[in-house]
Amino acid sequence: MALTAISGSATGIGNAVRERLQAQGDEVIGIDLRDAEVIADLGSPAGRTRAVEETRARCGGRLDRLVLCAGLGGHVEDPALVASVNYFGAVALLDGLLPDLRAGDAPAAVVICSNSAQLTPEIADWPLTVALLGDDEEKARAVAAETSGQAVYIASKNAVGRAVRRRAALWAEAGVRLNAVAPGTTRTPLLEGGLSTPGVGDAIRAFPVPLGRWAEPAEIAGVIVFLLGPDAAFVHGSVWYVDGGSDAVTRPELF
Ligand SMILES: NC(=O)c1ccc[n+]([C@@H]2O[C@H](COP(=O)([O-])OP(=O)(O)OC[C@H]3O[C@@H](n4cnc5c(N)ncnc54)[C@H](O)[C@@H]3O)[C@@H](O)[C@H]2O)c1
């Protein structure tokens, strides 16, 4: 029986991962604003410290798996909060819980990115992306406040994907596998929020999905659980697109 901590476990993809792991007999420590074992706000430094400390106390310093799903969509009114939760809320748990994962059994972590993270090559050099990866939350929040929510979302996911890849060497040395999953459009409360926001909903509906439908949360969870398990023992530092082919048709020459 493995012990897994999941941020964003209350709804959507995080909840689907929880259900899947619990169905196979694993134990889960959920981290969320509500309906979780650890109640913490990943949008603030104090909340992140609380999340790490309470998770550590619950797992007794020994954690087998970590799945980071907590996130906000670009339709949310406060873009600075999107930057704080999506980027800083992920890397604080990654770095904060690495010592506990080192002590785990065949430890592995998966961070949720997005297939929008590479929509255009310029994202990599946006001032917001640079501020996020520079771990400058004050500056990132100031830039985000002047930026559209969708652009903040994309930048936060580009930075999260790169944060995973930048950690590949260190985490391998620590004996902990680390990967990212980049979902496409998935039927969750986050998607509902986007669909019902003027200007955002139409863009989501227009985004091409070759398979002709949106994903169910369980379909994303299945790939996450695979990446956590023994059949993925040689997968490390990768970003897995689980998006019905959207990334392939928007960037056919890149992978
Ligand atoms: N749904 C999609 O189409 C889609 C596509 C690509 C990527 N994603 C990513 O998947 C991840 C999961 O999203 P989802 O679609 O399941 O959405 P969701 O809204 O169902 O789940 C997000 C979870 O994060 C939690 N959360 C939000 N703010 C928080 C905070 N400040 N502190 C702690 N927890 C907080 C929410 O309470 C919720 O349980 C997100 O990172 C999202 O960006 C989703």
Image: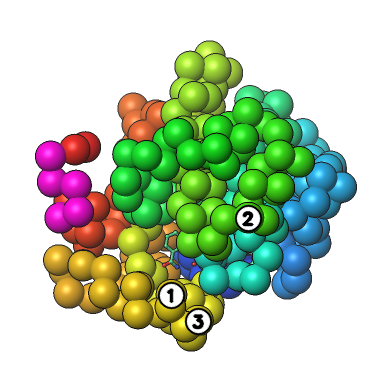
Given residues 204 and 103, the one toward you in this image is 204
Disc 1: which residue: 200
Is residue 203 in view? yes
Please say whether residue 180 is one of the residues in the magenta stretch. Answer: no
Residue drawn at the location 42% of the way across and 36% of the way down: 124
Residue 199 lies left or right of residue 130; in this view the side is left
Q: Are marks 3 and 1 in contact (CB under 8 Å)?
A: yes
**Residue 218 position by quadrant:** bottom left
Q: Residues within 10 Å of mark 3 (few under 14, many from 20)?
A: few
Residue drawn at the location 19% of the way across and 54% of the way down: 250
Is residue 111 in view? no
Helix, strand or loop for the magenta stretch, by majority = loop
| Above or below 125: residue 167 | above
Tag 3 secondary structure: loop
- At label 1, the amino acid type is Val
- At label 2, the amino acid type is Glu
Tag 2 secondary structure: loop
For marks 1 and 2, give the CA distance: 18 Å
Picture quarter with ligand 1: bottom right
Disc 2: which residue: 146
| Above or below 92: residue 152 | below
Q: Residue furthest top?
A: 173
Tag 1 secondary structure: loop
| Above or below 242: residue 228 | above
Q: Residues within 10 Å of mark 1 (few under 14, many from 20)?
A: some
Give the magenta-colored segment's residue range: 249-253
Disc 3: which residue: 197
Q: Earlier in the sequence, mark 3 or mark 2?
A: 2
Closer mark to the observer between disc 1 and disc 2: 2
Residue 28 lies left or right of residue 245; in this view the side is right
For marks 3 and 2, give the CA distance: 19 Å
